[in-house]
């Protein structure tokens, strides 16, 4: 494989012997499979883009996920102006977009705001909203005031997985967990195949809110959004999944696909449709 021939010569010399030992053992088939995947990964040739293979076909919505790191002394003021301006855009029918949720990070990166928007109609809708907002003087003033409160910001454009729930408004109070996974390049289809089965283990308590994968921004990123009554309920639900036949195996085979992962516990703002 390419990984084998790019390896240094000493490592290249021991790889065949290591793999032979792995494949000759009949007592540890799953360990062998996992270790072999570190060196040899057969990737089936794709005949279409990730966006066509994994995204929902019945909708053409595009999502934007925003991360704003706020100056600690400005977080209250930042939340106030967001709650004044963002719902107006959400409710105005001339903008083909919807505010799915808006939060402050509680556990994770501190003094951080997270916003999730949906654009009905994909990239043309995104462009239309951007052009109209340039002419919206209230929003222009809002952006100027907001910029003075921020340390940094970034965003990603996302599509939703076809097998996940559509994120819809819900009553609260809830806490939300955003679990973000940086996948190894080339493994998105494999991840989708596993999670298309795994999601059924995590829907008994209505905790699954939405699942997304990146199109622009940091690539090979996956975001899973969950809702829980509180931290103890989160712990109980997650522990219960391990008692369901098949969950352990699906987790086992998705872990090697991940390069990095992060969990944020978030509290919704009062004007968030997801409460």
Image (cartoon, helix red, strand yellow):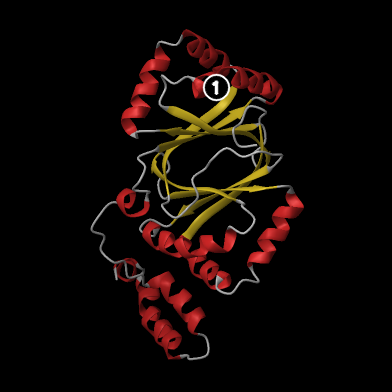
Q: Is residue 2 above or below residue 144?
A: below
Q: x%, y% of residue 26?
A: 48, 91
Q: How many marks?
A: 1
Q: Quadrant of residue 234?
A: bottom right
Identify the residue shown where x is 64% and y is 56%: 205
Circle 1: element type = helix
User: Is 46 situated left or right of 268 in this image?
Assistant: left
> Callout 1 environment at 10 Å: few (<14), some (14 to 19), or many (20+)?
some
Q: Nearer the viewer, residue 7 or 118?
A: 118
Q: Nearer the viewer, residue 228 or 142?
A: 228
Outermost residue toward the top? 137
Q: x%, y% of residue 208?
A: 57, 51
Q: Is residue 141 above or below residue 261?
A: above
Quadrant where the C terminus is found in the figure = top right
Q: x%, y% of residue 28?
A: 52, 85
Identify the residue shown where x is 67% and y is 18%: 77
Q: x%, y% of residue 27?
A: 52, 90
Residue at mark 1: 86
Identify the residue shown where x is 42% and y is 76%: 36
Quadrant where the N terminus is found in the figure = bottom left
Outermost residue toward the left? 47
User: Is 159 situated left or right of 178 in this image?
Assistant: left
User: Is 240 situated left or right of 44 in this image?
Assistant: right
């Amino acid at each position: 494989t390419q990984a084998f021939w790019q390896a240094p010569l000493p490592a290249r010399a021991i790889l065949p012997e290591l793999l032979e030992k792995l494949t000759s053992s009949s007592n540890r088939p799953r360990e062998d499979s996992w270790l072999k995947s570190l060196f040899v990964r057969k990737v089936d040739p794709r005949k279409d883009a990730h966006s066509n293979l994994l995204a929902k076909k019945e909708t053409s919505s595009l999502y934007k996920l925003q991360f704003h790191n706020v100056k600690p002394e400005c977080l209250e003021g930042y939340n106030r102006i967001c709650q004044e301006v963002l719902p107006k855009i959400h409710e105005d029918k001339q903008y083909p977009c919807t505010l799915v949720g808006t939060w402050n990070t509680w556990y994770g990166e501190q003094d951080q705001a997270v916003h999730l928007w949906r654009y009905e109609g994909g990239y043309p809708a995104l462009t239309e909203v951007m052009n109209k907002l340039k002419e919206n003087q209230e929003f222009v003033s809002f952006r100027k005031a907001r910029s003075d409160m921020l340390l940094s910001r970034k965003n990603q454009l996302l599509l939703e997985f076809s097998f996940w729930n559509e994120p819809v408004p819900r009553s609260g109070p809830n806490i939300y967990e955003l679990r973000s996974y940086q996948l190894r390049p080339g493994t998105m289809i494999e991840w989708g195949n596993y999670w298309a089965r795994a999601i059924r283990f995590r829907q008994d308590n209505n905790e699954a809110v939405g699942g997304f994968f990146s199109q622009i921004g940091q690539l090979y990123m996956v975001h899973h959004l969950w809702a829980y009554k509180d931290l103890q309920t989160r712990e109980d639900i997650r522990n219960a999944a391990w008692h369901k036949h098949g969950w352990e195996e699906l987790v086992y085979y998705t872990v090697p696909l991940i390069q990095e992962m992060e969990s944020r516990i978030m509290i919704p703002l009062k004007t968030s449709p997801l409460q």
